Amino acid sequence: MRVLFELLTEELPAKELLNINDSLLCAVLDRHNIDYQSASVYFTPRRIAAIINCKEFTKQQNQKIFGPPKNVCFDKDNKPTKALLSFLEKNNANIDECFFENTSKGTYACVFAKQTQKLVKELLCGIFSEFLSSIPFEKQMRWGSGDFVFLRPVHNLVLLADNEVIECSLFGKPSVSYTFGHRFLACHKIDLISKDYKEELKKHYVIVDQHTRQSIIKDSLEKLSNAQKRYVLDEDLLNEVVNLVEYPNCLEGTFEEEFLKLPQEVLISSMKANQKYFYSLNNGKLTNKFCIVSNMITDDDSVIVKGNERVLRARFRDAAFFYEEDLKVKLSDLVDKLKHMLFHKKLGSMYDRVERLVELTKKIASDIGADVDVAQRAAYLSKADLLTHMVYEFPEVQGIMGSIIAKKQSEKELVANCIYEQYLPKDEVYPKTKEGIALSLADKFDLIVGGMIADLKPSGNKDPYGLRRAALSIIKIALNTKLNFNIKDIVEFSANLYDKQGISQLNSVSQTLEFIKVRFINMFEEHSQIVKAVVEVDFSDIYDAFLKIEALKDFYTQSNEENLYSIKRVFNIVPDSFKKIDVDRELFVFSEESKFFEFVGSLKQNLEKFLQTKDYLSYLKNMIDNNIISSFFDNVLIMDKDEKIKNNRLALLNNYKQLVLKVADFKYLNI
């Protein structure tokens, strides 16, 4: 059976459409036991559609049903009792289909009862209602009398199964067998009975498949490229533009070369963010050619091109004016005016934030060996460009604009670079200078600590203040730069800066550290056991934790199970609450105790060099001496009846455990 669904709406927000995918529909179909061969979801700016190929009935499923306990199923002559026979009759089963299963409460009689198959047509309306509800749209709206809530007002509903209209009503619209084409090029009714949905809509200037629209745009950009220019395939822009048009028509426009004197980041930002144009480069430099993805086809495309050129020309003239005006004002003169710009009502002004950044950047710069004076100067000027005309008009160029103005106003080049690098990493571009790294880290630590103080923690898929992104950026910077810095010290320092400004920072330190740790664990989800074994012991240094994880992964895969278990056994025996490490040799009974004591003593002397060089794999390998450890456990009873001897042996093992804990806690490992 072939099922067709389409919801026709007002123009849908392009970015919201990215939340729709096949897996959402498949999940609903699976919950309803639909036996389907394929299920595809399509979307355009005006419609959400799906095509399903499935069986007419739901899957035949067997449900295990528990009956009476085994001890009441047969009498003394081993004949079925009334209790068993009643159970079988109730579930339409015979004695041969009965079996027994052990449970925590005992052994019970069981049968597999075949569930009644349902007609899929009767489920379709509910399935698509559930599918639409499962899409994680951020903002929805009401319309008309306000009875319905969806992304945008709904105009039409199609629900067909093998050319039969399935009775359904969604958002006040009854299901019909027709839809409408392109809003301007073919806005009349299109009957879909016995028609190929995608092909029929294509005839009416609607390309339903988003992947096809994407391919058309990619191919067009390639055709427009030549030796003098190459169009940049910006994936984020592509994904957005695909959802702005139903019938993409790629056209090339030109702007005056005089505008190329402006910083190219500003021009690119204007074309991408405001006009949704693709830009072209020649050897890394912007050209005056751009690509418009139009949703219209006319007899004369030059009309569309000229209209877009006129709009872009006006924006660039505004940008040129703003740029010249911003160069007239020194960045340092703008800093004091940040007192009148609110950062957050609970966290003070943007000037308060700058004051914190100056001190926090100084600390981090000192920790990682950066030029403190350069880093502090960059931190002082870091937010000044927020008050420029350019950033007000084009928010995407914050940092970039500050860096450009700083260079023009004879600030040190390193200071100017730092101002730009504070917003990195972005698109796998990382800060290159230590001073830029210090400022970038300070910016993100201050944001997260402030977020915890103001109770701005993300919930679900919402993170309006970018705290998750900030935490991931800190982790990525640490791993990319391979720098060691103590995040606990930095977070405590940052919290104290808020405290000095009269902003209470209760619990913000522990919350911030936990927030970053959770992001780190999620990054290495496929090795969660190993990651937890490391970070639950010590997560004060991100890169150091990463080195320990890599070493533990290698040790885990290279070592035999006996070696791993010998360490794990120590962790199983010595409880976390046991703190004693003083060992009394006079209480030793067996020679194996002395040998183990000497072995631990030699480890304390020899392992320190591996910690200093961060060679954690060698450290772990040297923890193993199978003869000594195995012999100890084979011949020594740890839990001796004599309390002193028992505690002494636990203390001996605890010394060994504490050495292992300098790398990882083996209680988190399944061995």
Image (spheres, rainbow, N blue to C red):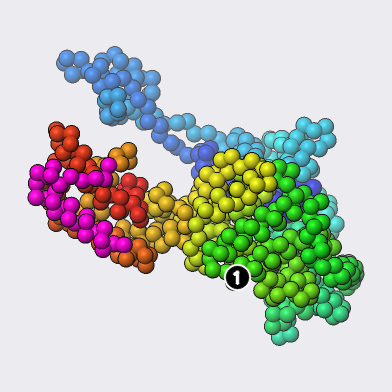
Tell which of 560 and 53 is nearer to you.
560
Query: Is 392 left or right of 528, judged from the image as shown?
Result: right
Badge 1: how crowded within 10 Å, few (<14), some, or many (20+)?
A: some
Q: Is residue 46 above or below residue 213?
A: above
Q: Position of residue 416 (x, y in %)?
A: 70, 71
Q: Which residues are magenta?
A: 580-608
Which residue position holds label 1? 371
Q: Is residue 178 visible?
A: no
Q: Is residue 201 above or below residue 317?
A: above
409 magenta-colored? no
Q: Position of residue 378 (x, y in %)?
A: 69, 66
Query: Is 284 left or right of 429, judged from the image as shown?
Result: right
Magenta residues: mostly which secondary structure?
helix
- Residue 370 is drawn in which quadrant? bottom right
Q: Is residue 142 above or below residue 5?
A: above
Q: Position of residue 558 (x, y in %)?
A: 28, 62
- Which residue sits at x=33%, y=51%? 661
- Which residue sits at x=65%, y=47%? 500
Q: How many marks?
A: 1
- Which residue sits at x=13%, y=42%? 587
581 magenta-colored? yes
Could you say whether the residue bearing mark 1 is in a helix, strand or loop?
loop
- Residue 414 is drawn in which quadrant? bottom right
Q: Is residue 243 above or below residue 260?
A: above
Q: Position of residue 199 (x, y in %)?
A: 70, 59
Give the amino acid at mark 1.
Answer: Asp
